[in-house]
Amino acid sequence: GAATFNAGASFGSDISIASTGDGLSLSRSGYDTYSLQHSTGNGMAIRNITDSRTEMFFNGAGKVGVGTTDPQTKFVVAHTDGGIGIEFSMGDPVSFIQCYNRTSNDYASLSIDGEDIRFRTNDGSERMRLDGDGALFLNTTSAMDNCFVSLQDHSNGEAFVGISSKDDNNVGIRFGVGTDRKWVNFRDTSNNLIWYSNAASAERMRITHAGTVLISTTA
């Protein structure tokens, strides 16, 4: 059966509601009707009865889904049920945020937008910032003159930029103005430092692993 309570009604003790239908429904004239329903596995759902849609789901094991009835992590906001969603997982020792498509079992694109984007660690200290002009700051919040990437050491006064290649391949830095690009191959597989120009990948200078400086020649 159904029971109706007028506005202003009060109860002096616990209330138990048993139902095989829409559970505890809330309605107001001119608005969609919502209900609080039990589901399998001791879960609980907040459903839009008017549109036959689950708005929020509690799975009974501490996981919450918005837009999905099968949250795979602690908290999920899904675009479509079982499809792409933003997933939050709280773990020990690592917690994470990911954009994942549960239909294709693959990661999806994630965009973060703001006036600037700041990354903090440990005690809330800012470690990295990407500002509104695209400049990147590491361990500093101020840019060096004409630099889009600024790095500053925060421990013993020394500062290094580390670049490592995979499988002992070449590693270097490229410089460019428009479409005109130059690069320095700081290490080849023979431990030489080599300077190239962009013209046909021509080598201009090298310092060999033995300390010999060669200009416009490789031997």
Image (cartoon, rainbow, N blue to C red):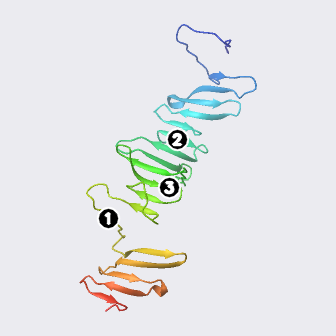
Residue 120 on image: x %, y %: 40, 48
What SS does tag 1 mark?
A: loop
Name the amino acid, label 3. Asp
Q: Is residue 2 left or right of residue 115?
A: right
Dividing the picture into quadrants, the one containing residue 67 is top right
Closer to the camera, 31 or 14?
31
Where is 80 relative to 51, above or below? below
Tell me the residue at 69%/26% (across/down).
33
Dividing the picture into quadrants, the one containing residue 10 is top right
Quadrant the N terminus occupies? top right
For the residues labelled 1 and 2, the Cα–Cα distance comes to 40 Å
Q: Which of marks 3 and 1 is nearer the N terminus?
A: 3
Quadrant the C terminus occupies? bottom left
Name the amino acid, label 1. Phe
- Residue highlighted by disc 1: 160
Q: How crowded is mark 3: few (under 14 residues within 10 Å), some or many (20 or more)?
A: some
Q: Residues within 10 Å of mark 2 (few under 14, many from 20)?
A: many
Tell me the residue at 57%/38% (across/down).
66
Q: Which of marks 3 and 2 is nearer the N terminus?
A: 2
Closer to the camera, 6 or 209?
209
- Residue highlighted by disc 3: 131
Q: Do callouts 3 and 1 mark residues in contact (Cβ within 8 Å)? A: no
What SS does tag 3 mark?
A: loop
Q: Which of marks 1 and 2 is nearer the N terminus?
A: 2
Closer to the camera, 210 or 137?
137
Tell me the residue at 43%/60% (across/down).
143
Q: Nearer the viewer, mark 1 or mark 2?
A: 1
What SS does tag 2 mark?
A: strand
Where is 133 relative to 121, above or below? below
The image's mark for residue 76 is: 2
